[in-house]
Amino acid sequence: MRIVVLGGAGIIGRAIARDLADDREVEEIVLADLDVDGARKVAVGLGRPGVVAVKADVTDHGALVNLVKGAGAVINSVQYYFNVPIMRACLEAGTHYIDLGGLFHTTRKQLELHNDFKKAGLLAVLGLGSCPGIANVQARAVADAFETVESIHIYNGATPDMGDSLAWAYSIQTIFDEVTQPPVVFRDGKFQETAPLGEEELYRFQDPIGVAKVHLSLHSEVATLPLTYGPKGIKDCFFKISFFGYSEKALRQLQFLAQIGMASTETIEVRGAGVRPRDVLVEVLKRAPQTERKGSLGFKDIVTEVRGTRAGKPVSGKVETTAWPHTTWRISGGTLLVASPPAIVARWLARGRVRQAGVLPPEQAVDAAAFFRDLEARGARTTVAVAEPFPA
C-alpha cells in the first residue's frame, strides 16, 4: 500500500504521516513538499522503513501526475487554493483523493468534478479533517435516521491559550481568510453571507473548556450539508468556532490587523516595490517572540446538533467528539482530530473498502460507525445522544 501526503512537511501533514507510520500495511509513505528538507526531517523522525521524502511543486501538473500515479490514495494537506488542480492531477493519474476542506467556495467548485471522478471509478472525499470532516460524519450519525432534518448546528471548541500567543495551530493563510471573508450560513432554506466573526454566543463545551465564546466562520460543512439533507427539508445550518484556537485577546489583535488592511492579498506599491500586505504580516508574525503556546492543554471538543423528526415526532440529536493530546505522537487533541480522519479513510480507499465513486463530502462517503471506532482507537471519544420531548 502506497499513500502520498502532499504537504508532508507541514503542521498537519507531518501528523498525518505519524498516523500512517503506525500501520505496517502502509508499506510506502511519500512525503511530498516544496520544503524537501522539512519533509526529510519528518521522514527521519518517523524512524521506520518505507517513508520517502520528495520535492513537489503542486503547480507542475505533469510532475504531480507522475508523483501520485500508482498510489492507493492521495492526501492533500497543502493550502486549499490548490485543491482543484491537485484533484485534476489525481483524476489523470487514476488515484483516489482526500483533502481537508475548501473554505466553502472552493469546495463548491470541486463538486463540479463529480461526474468525471465517477466515470473514472475514483472517489474524492472533500473536507475530511475535524471541521469539516468529523462534524459532517457526526451529522450523518443521527440525521440519516431522521425522517426530516430541520437544522444542523456545529460548534468547535478548544482549551484556551493562556499565553495569548500569536502562533498558529494550522495554516495562517486559512485563518486570515476566515477572519476576513464573510461566513456563509444556510438560513430559511437559503445560503446567506454574514459578517466575519459575527453572531457570537456562549456555548457549553466539555471541561476543561467549559463555557466559551463561539462565532461564525466561513466553512465547508455549510457548503455540503444543506445539499445532502435538502431532500429531508433542512432549513438551517451554521458552523461556529471559538477563536480558531487563539485566546480572545490574540484573535482580537489579528482581527485589528486585518481591519487596517494587513491581511489583504492585493498588491500595493511601497517605495517603488510591489508587496502584498499579508505576505509582510506573515513574515513579521514568524519572527514574533512568542513562538509557542503557553498553558494550552490541547483538549478539543467538536459538537454537532441536529433537529428534525422521527416516526412523526420532533427529535434532536447531539454528537460529540473529544480528544486530549496524543502523548506518544506528541500532538494536541486538535491536531489529532484533523490529521487522523484522512489517514483513516486513505487506508480504507487503498484497501478497497469504499466502493463509492465521484466527488463526495464526508457525510456521504464515510461510514460513521466504523469511522468513530477507528478514531476511538487513537484516543478520541465520541458520544451520540438522541432525545424526544416529554409528552405534553
Image (cartoon, rainbow, N blue to C red):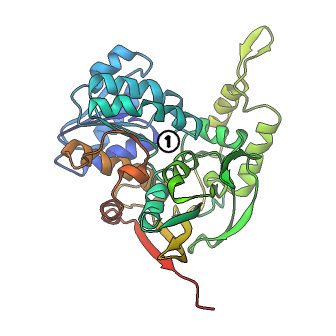
Query: Mark 1: few, some, or many residues within 10 Å (few <14, many ≥20)?
Result: many
Q: Nearer the viewer, residue 169 or 109?
A: 109
Circle 1 is placed at which residue position? 101
Q: Nearer the viewer, residue 247 or 108?
A: 108
Q: Position of residue 335 (x, y in %)?
A: 46, 52
**Which amino acid, by three-letter code, is at mark 1?**
Gly
Could you say which quadrant of the image residue 39 lies in?
top left
The quadrant of the picture occupied by the N terminus is top left
In the image, residue 354 sits, relative to residue 247, either above or below, namely: above
Residue 361 showing in the rendered view: yes
Q: Residue at x 54, y 76 (%)?
A: 315
Q: Residue at x 36, y 28 (%)?
A: 116
Q: Residue at x 67, y 48 (%)?
A: 190
Q: Nearer the viewer, residue 20 or 59?
A: 59
Q: Does residue 51 appear to the left or right of 222 in the view shown?
A: left
Describe the element under mark 1 as helix, strand or loop: loop
In the image, residue 42 sits, relative to residue 63, either above or below, namely: below
Q: Position of residue 130 (x, y in %)?
A: 47, 53
Q: Position of residue 118 (x, y in %)?
A: 32, 34
Q: Residue at x 62, y 51 (%)?
A: 244
Q: Nearer the viewer, residue 36 or 196?
A: 196
